[in-house]
Amino acid sequence: MGHIESRNMVASSFLGALLALLLVLPAHGAPNYKLRKGARGDICISCHDEFEKVVKKRFLHTPLAEGDCTGCHSPHTSNHEMLLAAESGQLCYECHDEMIPEDAKSVHQVVLEGKCVSCHDPHGTDNENALKMPGADLCFECHKDYRKNIRSYKNQHDPVEDDCLECHNPHASAESRKLLTDEVPSLCLDCHDTDESSFKNLHQNYPVQTGSCTSCHNPHGSNTTAILYDNVHEPVTDGKCDECHEGTSASNPFALKNIGYQICEGCHYELVVDTLNMKRVHWPVLDQVGCINCHSPHASPQKPLLREPMLELCGSCHSDTVARQERSETEHPPIADGECYECHSSHSSNEIFLLRESSVIDSCGNCHDWESHSRHPMGKKIIDPRNGNLTVQCLSCHRTHGTEYEYFIYTEKTNGTCVQCHERFRR
Amino acid sequence: MRRTVTIFTVLVCFLGSVQASGADSTRIRWVTSAYGDIEGRGLKNPEGVACSGKDLFVADTGNSRLLHYTYADKIMTAKATFAIHKSIPIVVQVNSKGHLYYLDGRERRIVVLDAAGSDSFLDPKGLPFSTDMVPKSFKIDSEDNFHILDIFSEKVVVLDSEGQYLRHLAFPEGFGSFSDLAVDSSGSVFLLDGVEAKIYSAGANADQFSPLTESLKEYANFPTSLATDEEGLIYVVDRNGSGLVLVDPNGSFLGRKVGSGWTEGLLHYPSQICITDEGNILIADRSNSRVQLFKVVGGK
């Protein structure tokens, strides 16, 4: 037989075998593993009998309701815990991929992290949507501060008592920040009729329905009438909106009568004058936004009308400094507790870094009895050997906001700091 | 086959090293430091520096004075001291005629210092807007025009050498807080957002700023000052990180230079920066109460 003829024979044999194989294989769909009836679910319960109670729950996850445990679990082996067919969060998205809209303005952190089982039982519960707990109780498991505050408020906001989901989307929101189902004030106007005369009177006839309700009102409740935040700016309490804003007949009633710190000067004259007379003024005081960079002009949960707790507020610009303390080996309580004002003046000072005290030693000495902690010479008369223009003080060895080393020193070991100056002891 | 793989590997390594060296081959080498005036009285938390040829000027903020140095052969020599009592000089500039100007941090106005040592405020004339000005920084360009970073009107206001209004550029939207500006030899203006660690730029004839860089937060803790050299390289002082960040004219990060410390060549909460005609860098090393001169080597 010639060479070409033998090759043709081999090719023909191969094609024949392939054809035979195709005829043998089933024509449609998934391979037939010859499973027993109930193999995808019912049989599982014969070993996992704890699920006999679970399947009786009111709200079952669909795969379980259909008796299809293999919808989520691999029956043989898996690289994931609980024999899941994929990573826990990723698995849910294979069916529930609509949870985060493309243009989401806010996303619940647990959803972003794929921790769906933080809220949902993947099998079933007696709570709608197979939630682990009903209503706000589930939210308060993480948002503990809200539980504490909401339950203590004298004046409650009705929707909050009902369910957080009256206002919030638990997964993500394309409408607003903070998982709100709609922007403020649209969300508020779903319940509150701003055309009522009583409403208008209370708001001095200003068109507040075009503003932001939460600049004055705490949507979760408060101890103040009308659920205003607990600290209210006096003109607001007195209903004197026109102290700062144009009158209600103006083309833009909310327009301010002045800008920057100048608008606050009318009532806070001495404070403004004292602030501006210092050598160094905190720059936000002087820009176009002025005092309300940090203070809420209407009401706030924080004294003295700070927009946010001090750590978050200062950290909104000085994020590097706050992050430094978070990473620090040793905690410095005034910083960790967000009491920046212990050392720094928020408005102005004659010192660099807006320190309250002219002497760093005096500043630290307000808390630290350094004379008993360290007998190292310090003070204006002790010249720093490294630099004749400097004197030895606390910051010669410590970095107040933290370092990666203990006691905020700059070196791993204490003697590493000492030999910065005492060079003859270097090894 | 083996030969092909070897040649390919060598080529990849070579091209990679060429690319890497272009990206970060600029070296900053310490040259000298200055600690005091002609009489040896020490600097105290200086915040401003200005460079003009061989003449270097320092705003010795803590001592309310300006100092004049000359630089030659790697030595800075103190020449003159200008006492400006009750003023807090935080930014200093010098124009082409050698006239000194400084920003008084207490009055928040630009002061003109004449040859006799008398000072007067720069009074802007012909402003088309009526708000007060709060200058946070200012620079003088090659035509002796003032570019003022006015945080109250949220504009960069350009005045001629006599203070007459020329034009202004509004701050771009969505900024954090601008801390400094720079003007290059072509008249392009650069704005430094210290909170967002971003740089914006506007060409000489542009009427608005646009972002030049993404956020440089990964490389700079809290940048507060910037300057450009003749080739368009941008030097950004990271005050809280006590370092220098280099950015190319296209806004790409090139590298981070210098470190934090007390020994010469290191910085501690540095402030203003200026570039000499020879391309040397003068930095007000504020918390070390000195100024330091660095030389730029290689890379351009």
Image: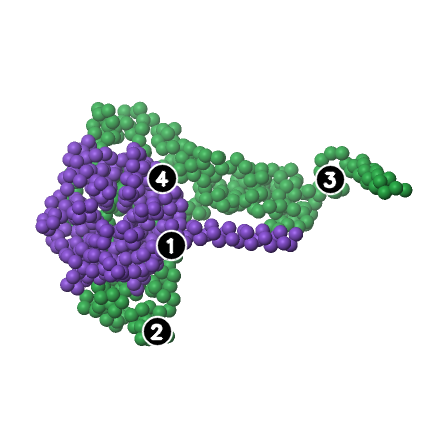
Chain colours: A green, B purple
Mark 1 and mark 4 lie on one chain; the one further toward the N terminus is 4
Residue at numbered disc 1: B298
Say which amino acid is labelled 2. Arg
Marks 1/4 same chain: yes
Say which amino acid is labelled 4. Pro
Which residue is located at x 40 percent, y 50 percent?
Answer: B254
Q: CA distance from mark 2 to mark 3?
A: 75 Å
Residue at numbered disc 2: A426
Which residue is located at x 31 percent, y 24 percent?
Answer: A195
Mark 2: few/some/many CA within 10 Å (<14, 14-19, 20+): few
B14 lies above or below A199: below
Q: Chain of mark 2?
A: A
Give residue B232's quadrant in the image. top left
Residue at numbered disc 4: B211
Give residue A247's quadrant in the image. top left
**Nearer-the-camera pick, B128 or B139:** B139
In the displayed orientation, state which residue is furthest to the right: A1
How far across and down, in percent of the image, does residue B109 sit?
17, 44
In the displayed orientation, state which residue is furthest to the front: B73
- Label 3 vs label 4, nearer the camera: 4
Q: CA distance from mark 1 to mark 4?
A: 28 Å
How far across and down, in percent of the image, does residue A382 sit?
21, 69
Mark 3: few/some/many CA within 10 Å (<14, 14-19, 20+): few
Label 4 near label 3: C-beta < 8 Å? Answer: no
Mark 1: few/some/many CA within 10 Å (<14, 14-19, 20+): few
| Rendered image: mark on residue A31 | 3
Question: Which element is circle 3 on?
Answer: loop
Say which amino acid is labelled 1. Gly
